């Protein structure tokens, strides 16, 4: 079984969320996320074109999770 890469899209998003929680949007950068993962910034560009794309991916993932919770709550009421 291959060793999971610390620069897969999910790991990058998790690191970005952690930075956002600790430092806010101003603290989020490709360089900061790469540093948190222990990789060079260029390693992230395979998955995200830049900071804005990474921020959009974090927002999209958050929206998907909220929608899933709402759907479960609505189906429990029906």
Image (spheres, rainbow, N blue to C red):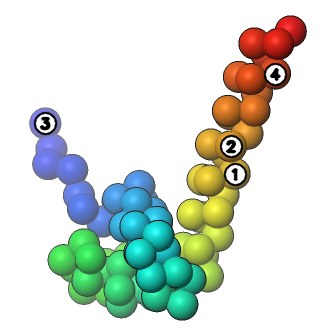
- Quarter of the rendering containing residue 16: bottom left
Q: Are marks 4 and 2 in contact (CB under 8 Å)?
A: no
Image position, residue 52 (x, y; %): 61, 82
Q: Are marks 2 and 1 in contact (CB under 8 Å)?
A: yes
Image position, residue 27 (x, y; %): 46, 88
Give how far apart the Cα atoms at labels 2 and 1 are.
5 Å
Q: Nearer the viewer, mark 1 or mark 4?
A: 4
Image position, residue 51 (x, y; %): 54, 84
Question: Dot 4, how many residues are within 10 Å of its Cα: few (below 14), some (14-19), or many (20+)?
Answer: few
Residue on which disc 2 sits: 66
Label 1 sits on a secondary structure element that is: helix
Residue on which disc 1 sits: 63
- Residue pictured at 56% horizontal, 83% vertical: 25
Q: Quadrant of the N terminus?
A: top left
Image position, residue 44 (x, y; %): 38, 76
Instruction: Describe residue 10's horizontal placement relative to residue 40 as left or right.
Output: right
**Mark sitting on residue 1:** 3
**Mark sitting on residue 74:** 4
């Amino acid at each position: 079984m291959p060793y999971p890469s610390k620069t897969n899209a999910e790991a990058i998003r998790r690191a970005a969320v952690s930075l956002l929680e600790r430092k806010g949007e101003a603290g989020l950068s490709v360089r900061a996320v790469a540093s948190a993962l222990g990789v060079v910034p260029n390693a992230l560009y395979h998955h995200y074109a830049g900071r804005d794309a990474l921020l959009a991916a974090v927002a999209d993932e958050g929206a998907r999770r909220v929608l899933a919770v709402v759907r479960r709550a609505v189906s429990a009421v029906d």
